[in-house]
Amino acid sequence: MTERRKAATRLEIAREAVRLFVDRGVAATTAEEIAAAAGISQRTLWRYTSSKELCVSPLLTYALDSATVLMRSWPRDRPLAEAFAGDPSGPSGESASADAEALRDLVLLTRTEPGLRAVWLQVHYDAERVFAEVIAERTGWTPDDLEPRVQATLFNSALRIAVEQWAWGEDPSPGSLPGAVARALGIARAGLSG
């Protein structure tokens, strides 16, 4: 199976897991039900994940991976903050809208489902190292230096909080998410001047 097909299968598992978690709750949803909804065997499901809560990770990492790609490709002669200042064009169409809806549902579930909250926070924690590496590549620091680590943490936290505000807010349409991200990053850039 190609890496692209594996990634598509992981994303489909994540979508179906979220759908089932919303309909039934995490505790009432079995791995067997997730596998059946995704069109795979339970044995195959366990090749992709080690717990039913972790099934949702690809839905979360998809957006963070996209941010990393944008950061890595951003021209070095332009400030990295500008990469997210506008209305970034991301995936569009029915699939992107469905993924945005699934992401919103998942983030809403993190408020009441400790296992999903743990996955949400772990995915963001893991992303900080990657963001620090990207920042270090652009600045000449090492990823373990204080500057890229703090900058990566600020960036990552702004992304996480922006998504939470969007999901929990009054306008959870997919089109409002880039604006929430841009606003949160602007606040992070302003720093602690308040």
Image (spheres, rainbow, N blue to C red):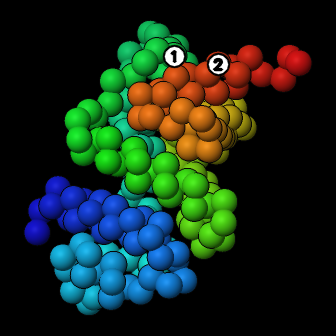
Q: Are marks 1 and 2 in contact (CB under 8 Å)?
A: yes
Badge 2 crowding class, 10 Å Cα cut-off, few under 14, some 14 to 19, many 20 or more, is: some
Query: Where is residue 36 drawn, in percent x and y?
Result: 24, 81
Query: Where is residue 180 drawn, in percent x and y?
Result: 57, 28
Q: Where, quadrant-wise, is the C terminus in this rendering? A: top right
Tag of residue 186: 2
Residue 39, image quadrant: bottom left
Left or right: where 123 falls relative to 35: right
Work out whether residue 174 or residue 148 is closer to the camera in this orientation and state it.
Answer: 174
Q: Where, quadrant-wise, is the N terminus in this rendering? A: bottom left
**Residue 105 makes an appearance in the image:** yes
Give amino acid for label 1.
Ala
Query: Where is residue 63 drawn, in percent x and y?
Result: 41, 43
Residue 157, image quadrant: top right
**Residue 55 makes an appearance in the image:** no
Q: What SS does tag 1 mark?
A: loop
